[in-house]
Image (cartoon, coloured by chain):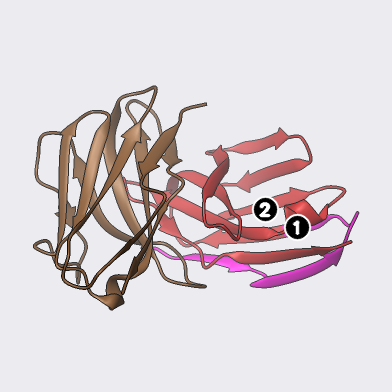
C-alpha cells in the first residue's frame, strides 16, 4: 500500500528555536496533505490543509505565522514550528490524500518536545 | 452539524473475545475510515469504506449508509490488538476528515 513518511520521528528543541518536520508520500503523488496535532489522550486535531503549489488553509485558531507550511511538490510538505514554546510540545501527524480516490494515508508522526 | 460518535470509549476484554466498536455519524459521507493507533503514536489505516463490508485477517468492518453507522469487529482478540481505534469520516462535499473520539481497547491475556 501507499506509504507516507515523516522526518524526524522525534525531536527535542529549546524554547525559541524553530523546528521543521517533513512529510513525504513515497510512492504516489498526493493531491493534498493534511497536518494534525494530537495532545495526550486526545483525538487528532486538523491544523491545516496543504495543496501543492498554493498556500495552506489553516483551521480556526491555528496561527499561520507560527506554523509555516510549505508544499513544494506533490510528494513533499513541510511544517515549520517557529519560535517554539513548551505548549507546542505535541505529536504532529501528516496524512496524504491520494489523487483520484478517497484514500488518506497517515505518516508515523513526529513527537516534538520543547524544553 | 457534522458529527462523529464512537462507542464505547473504553473497552477491556479477555483474550479470544469477539470485539465490536461502533461509529455513528450525522449526515451523508463519501468515505469512512477505521484507524488504529498504538501507544507509540503511529496511525495505521485499517479500512476505508463507502459501502458494504470489508475483511482483513481477524478484522471486519461494516457500514450501513442508510443508518449512518459503521462497526469494526475483531475476532479472536489478542493482546497485541490493544490500541486506540478511531473512526474518521469524510462528509459529502468536504475533503477533510472528521474524527471520532476513539475507543481505547485493552485485551487481557
Where, quadrant-wise, is the C terminus of chain A in this rendering?
bottom left
Q: Which residues are magenta?
A: B1-20
Q: How many badges with numbers are in the image? A: 2
Q: Quadrant of residue B19 in the image? A: bottom right
Q: Work out whether disc 1 and disc 2 sit on a shared chain.
A: yes
Which residue position is annotated with label 1?
B20
Which chain is drawn using brown?
A
**Residue A59 locus on image (x, y percent):** 21, 62
Percent coordinates x, y for residue B61 in the rendering: 67, 44
Subunit ID for the residue under disc 2: B
Image quarter of residue A61? bottom left
Within 10 Å of disc 2 (Cα), the crowding (few <14, some 14-19, many 20+) is many
Say which colour chain B has.
red
Q: Look at the image and tell me whether residue A43 can be seen.
A: yes
Secondary structure under tag 2 reads strand
Q: Kindly indicate whether the residue at mark 2 contacts the one at mark 1 (C-beta within 8 angstroms).
A: yes
Left or right: where B77 falls relative to A107? right
Question: Which residue is tagged 2?
Answer: B71
Above or below residue A53? Residue A21 is below
Amino acid at each position: 500500500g501507499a506509504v507516507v513518511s515523516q522526518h524526524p520521528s522525534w525531536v527535542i528543541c529549546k524554547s525559541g528555536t524553530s523546528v521543521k518536520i517533513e512529510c513525504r508520500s513515497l510512492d504516489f503523488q498526493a493531491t493534498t496533505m493534511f497536518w494534525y496535532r494530537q495532545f495526550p489522550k486526545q483525538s487528532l486535531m486538523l491544523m491545516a490543509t496543504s495543496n501543492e503549489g498554493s498556500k495552506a488553509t489553516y483551521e480556526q485558531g491555528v496561527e499561520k505565522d507560527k506554523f509555516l507550511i510549505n508544499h513544494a511538490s506533490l510528494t513533499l510538505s513541510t511544517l515549520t514550528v517557529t519560535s517554539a514554546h513548551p505548549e507546542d510540545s505535541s505529536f504532529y501527524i501528516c496524512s496524504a490524500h491520494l489523487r483520484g480516490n478517497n484514500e488518506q494515508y497517515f505518516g508515523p508522526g513526529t513527537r516534538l518536545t520543547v524544553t | 452539524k457534522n458529527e462523529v460518535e464512537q462507542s464505547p470509549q473504553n473497552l477491556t476484554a479477555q483474550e479470544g473475545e469477539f470485539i465490536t466498536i461502533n461509529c455513528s455519524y450525522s449526515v451523508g459521507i463519501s468515505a469512512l475510515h477505521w484507524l488504529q493507533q498504538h501507544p507509540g503514536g503511529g496511525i495505521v489505516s485499517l479500512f476505508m469504506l463507502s459501502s458494504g463490508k470489508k475483511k482483513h485477517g481477524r478484522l471486519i468492518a461494516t457500514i450501513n449508509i442508510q443508518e449512518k453507522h459503521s462497526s469494526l469487529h475483531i475476532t479472536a482478540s489478542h493482546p497485541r490488538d490493544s490500541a486506540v481505534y478511531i473512526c474518521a469520516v469524510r462528509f459529502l462535499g468536504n475533503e477533510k476528515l472528521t474524527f471520532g473520539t476513539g475507543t481505547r481497547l485493552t485485551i487481557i491475556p
